[in-house]
Amino acid sequence: MKSSNWLGRTSQMWKVWLLVGSLLLIFAFGLTDYIARFHGLLATVGGALFLVFTVPWMFYGIRCRACGGRPFARLMHQFDGRQWPAIYFSMQRCPLCGDDAFHKEA
Ligand SMILES: [Zn+2]
């Protein structure tokens, strides 16, 4: 079965789910912080972890097999932050080289 988007076809969907998971984790950090009244300590730690690991991961973790480029950086320039998650999930081809990943390389 062919996946309906470029990330799935390039077997990189798990990377996005990992990112979504880490976002939920950070949200849980913030929520715990709020409930337990840690005065922003956990939220700060969560935010720092996000900046240190998740953002570079998004930038460098997802790559195009065809051109070796990193589509996220390009998308960041083309669209604002509210649009790119939807664009990422519906992406049909590499925004850098146009590879649609339908023809798998051996
Ligand atoms: Zn490409």
Image: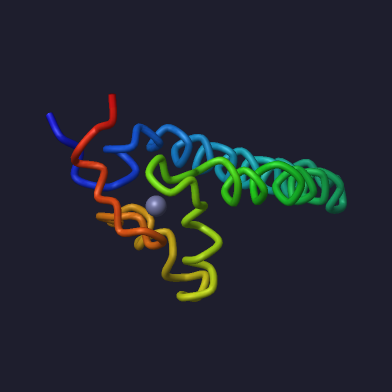
Q: Quadrant of the N terminus?
A: top left
Along the line of sight, which residue is nearer the eye, 23 or 59? 59
Q: Residue at x 51, y 57 (%)?
A: 72
Q: Residue at x 63, y 41 (%)?
A: 28
Judged left or right of residue 12, residue 49 is right
Judged left or right of residue 81, residue 88 is left
Label count reads: 0
Above or below — where is 28 with respect to 72?
A: above
Q: Residue at x 42, y 45 (%)?
A: 64
Residue 35 spot, x, y in % from top left: 72, 45
Residue 79 spot, x, y in % from top left: 46, 75
Residue 25 spot, x, y in % from top left: 61, 38
Judged left or right of residue 48, residue 74 is left
Q: Residue furthest left?
A: 1
Q: Quadrant of the C terminus?
A: top left
Q: Residue furthest top?
A: 106
Q: How is the image coloured?
A: rainbow
Q: Residue at x 35, y 62 (%)?
A: 87
Q: Quadrant of residue 54?
A: top right
Q: Quadrant of residue 8?
A: top left
Judged left or right of residue 5, residue 37 is right
Above or below — where is 78 with respect to 61?
A: below
